[in-house]
């Protein structure tokens, strides 16, 4: 990943805002627990308020070293609310099998909740960045059409 301006740490995981791309970047290492998930979600909300108020965050998640989430992490994420209930996340670096499961879960959640948010698990960082740019362009067109 490109050079970051500042880095926030929660356990083994790090989060930073990449100014040149406008992306919030998360490096997920090992298993994330509930306290770490809450700290990361709070920091994402802080970045959202500071760098792009009124707009959704676009997140680039490096999953090359990730091993998962604890039950309390999943619960913490479901309870956390960002200032905007819209997030775009591209996850990269996981195996094909893990990407497939992640994409199926994201698709089921979007159908079940009619969410504005979108997420995609892809193989490489360049694919993730391209997908996020595509989502940003779609959001921009929707805003301009309204």
Image (cartoon, helix red, strand yellow):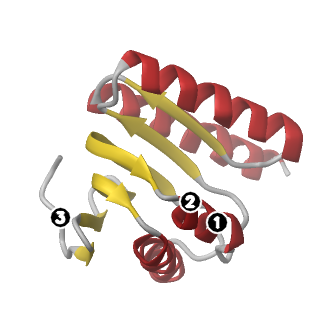
Q: Residues within 10 Å of mark 1 (few under 14, many from 20)?
A: some
Distance in Å between CA atoms under marks 1 and 2: 6 Å
Badge number at residue 75: 1
Q: Residues within 10 Å of mark 3 (few under 14, many from 20)?
A: some
Could you say which is closer to the camera, residue 38 or residue 58?
A: 38
* SS of the residue under disc 2: helix
Q: Residue at left 36%, top 25%?
A: 127
Determine contact: label 1, label 2, CB under 8 Å: yes
Image coordinates of residue 66 in percent, x first then y, are 30, 45
Residue 33 drawn above or below residue 35: above
Q: Residue at left 39%, top 33%?
A: 128
Could you say which is closer to the camera, residue 11 or residue 58?
A: 11
Name the mark nearer the viewer: 2 or 3.
2
Residue with the mark numbered 3: 4
Residue with the mark numbered 2: 71
* SS of the residue under disc 3: loop
Could you say which is closer to the camera, residue 52 or residue 101?
A: 101
Image coordinates of residue 92 in percent, x first then y, are 35, 34
Name the mark nearer the viewer: 1 or 2.
2
Distance in Å between CA atoms under marks 1 and 3: 29 Å
Image coordinates of residue 109 in percent, x first then y, are 76, 40
Residue 130 drawn above or below residue 75: above
């Amino acid at each position: 990943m490109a050079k970051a301006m500042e880095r926030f740490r929660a356990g083994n995981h790090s989060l930073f805002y990449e100014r040149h791309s406008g992306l919030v970047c998360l490096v997920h290492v090992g298993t994330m627990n509930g306290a770490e998930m809450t700290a990361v979600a709070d920091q994402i909300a802080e970045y959202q308020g500071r760098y792009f108020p009124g707009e959704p965050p676009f997140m680039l998640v490096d999953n090359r070293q990730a091993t998962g989430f604890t039950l309390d992490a999943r619960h913490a994420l479901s309870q956390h609310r960002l200032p905007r209930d819209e997030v775009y996340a591209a996850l990269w670096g996981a195996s094909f099998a893990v990407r497939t499961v992640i994409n199926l879960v994201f698709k089921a959640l979007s159908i079940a909740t009619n969410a504005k948010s979108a997420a995609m698990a892809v193989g490489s960082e360049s694919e993730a960045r391209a997908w996020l740019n595509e989502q940003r362009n779609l959001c921009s067109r929707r805003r301009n059409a309204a």
